[in-house]
Image (cartoon, rainbow, N blue to C red):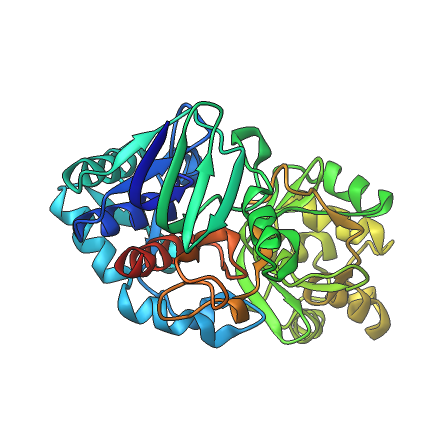
Amino acid sequence: MNEKYDVVVIGAGAAGMMSAIEAGKRGRKTLLIDHSKKIGEKIRISGGGRCNFTNINTSPSKYISNNPSFIISALSQYNQENFIDLVKKYKIKFHEKKLGQLFCDSSAQEIIDMLLNECQLANVILKVDTKVLKINYKDKIFIIRDNLNTYLSSSLIIATGGLSVPKIGASKFGYDVAKQFNINVIDTVPALVPLTFNEKILNKCKLLAGVSANAVISLKKTFFEEGMLFTHRGLSGPSILQISSYWKEGDSINIDLCPEKNIFNLLLEKRNIFPKQNINTIINYFLAKRLATLICEENQITGNIGELSNKNIKKLADSINNWIVHPTGTEGYRTAEVTLGGVDTNELSSKTMMSKKYPGLFFIGEVVDVTGHLGGYNFQWAWSSGYIAGQYA
């Protein structure tokens, strides 16, 4: 049986729901399809179940893309303030965590319920547990088939996300659709993901599991100053996740475990004033005890600071302010928060998110080669790109 629509949206995540809402508001007969029984799973699990739904500091500089200026149009048409207004309209209580991150006070489910209600108000027809098997294009009409029905529409929005978190249904569907329509896809890699390390560093991390440091992690000219965590599997925490989006195989990263202090100068000063102080005790002033002890042991430096040479003091200082590590890889899509790469932005209109080759075909959200930093930026990209596609579909 053929069902006719003005707009079909495949993928009922953040971007897909947003685009369906906006298309429906314009009086377009809109169908929203998802292969899962439960929609919005990535929203539900994000932010520890409280959904870091946007960031008040959202700007194009917070995104990675082969075409960085592509993001400007979407963010200017629908920004973080617009989404915050929607959240306020539904009287959802939220709070700001550090660095402008906004979270629900109660539960991420409130954001999902808000979007579902908006879909209902916009007369969006939602079909869950529906797997699209085939898409054809003939006479400017998209023919979309599942195992029971055929849907016809003049506009098709692909909002199927990336490859991250496969356990909640992530798939390469969107990239396959792009390739079917001869649209270039930039190679994808896991992003915002813990890094993996060789046995030597791994052993160190295991000994320090649970210890955190407010480190500055840098790679070439890119750096992040946020929490870093030692775990049984290696290094994690916000600053490591951030730098992972920039890391490529073979790159080394620099870790400053005590960025607010120049440890070399400080230790020289201590040696002059308190020569009888134990070096381990001094290092423990700046770092967690287990970390301070391990650094001293690794460098085989013990005793009073007055007995230490400049060379040994420099060795210690570098272990703290300039620890260079060589990741061997990442934990992959299983634990990655997002996917880097995707549908080439040169193939899309930055004003509408529509394909330049196929009028009526749109790609939005994570499936596109736009990846935000950690902290609500990826959700804002979903809202912004979904909003503008919904205006033109």
Does the rendering let one see residue 21? yes
User: Residue at coordinates 58% horizontally, 60% vertically from top-left?
Assistant: 183
Q: Quadrant of the N terminus?
A: top left
In this picture, residue 351 sits left or right of residue 235: left
**Residue placed furthest toward the front:** 139
Residue 15: x, y in percent?
37, 49
Left/right placement of residue 302 relative to residue 359 reads: right
Please state if 245 lies on the left or on the right of 110 as rendered.
Answer: right
Where in the figure is residue 345, as x and y percent of width and height? 52, 67
Q: Residue at x 81, y 55 (%)?
A: 303
Question: Up-down: is 62 above or below 191?
Answer: below
Q: Is residue 285 visible?
A: no
The image quadrant where one finds the C terminus is bottom left
On the image, which quarter does residue 255 sit in? bottom right
Residue sitting at x 81%, y 40%? 203
280 and 358: which is toward the camera: 358
- Out of 225 and 132, give the one closest to the viewer: 132
> In the shown orientation, is residue 367 left or right of residue 229?
left
The residue closer to the viewer here, 114 or 293, is 114
Q: Percent position (x, y) of residue 211?
A: 61, 42
Q: Residue at x 29, y 55 (%)?
A: 390
Q: Quadrant of residue 83?
A: bottom left
Picture coordinates of residue 322 (x, y %)? 72, 67
Q: Nearer the viewer, residue 70 or 279?
A: 70
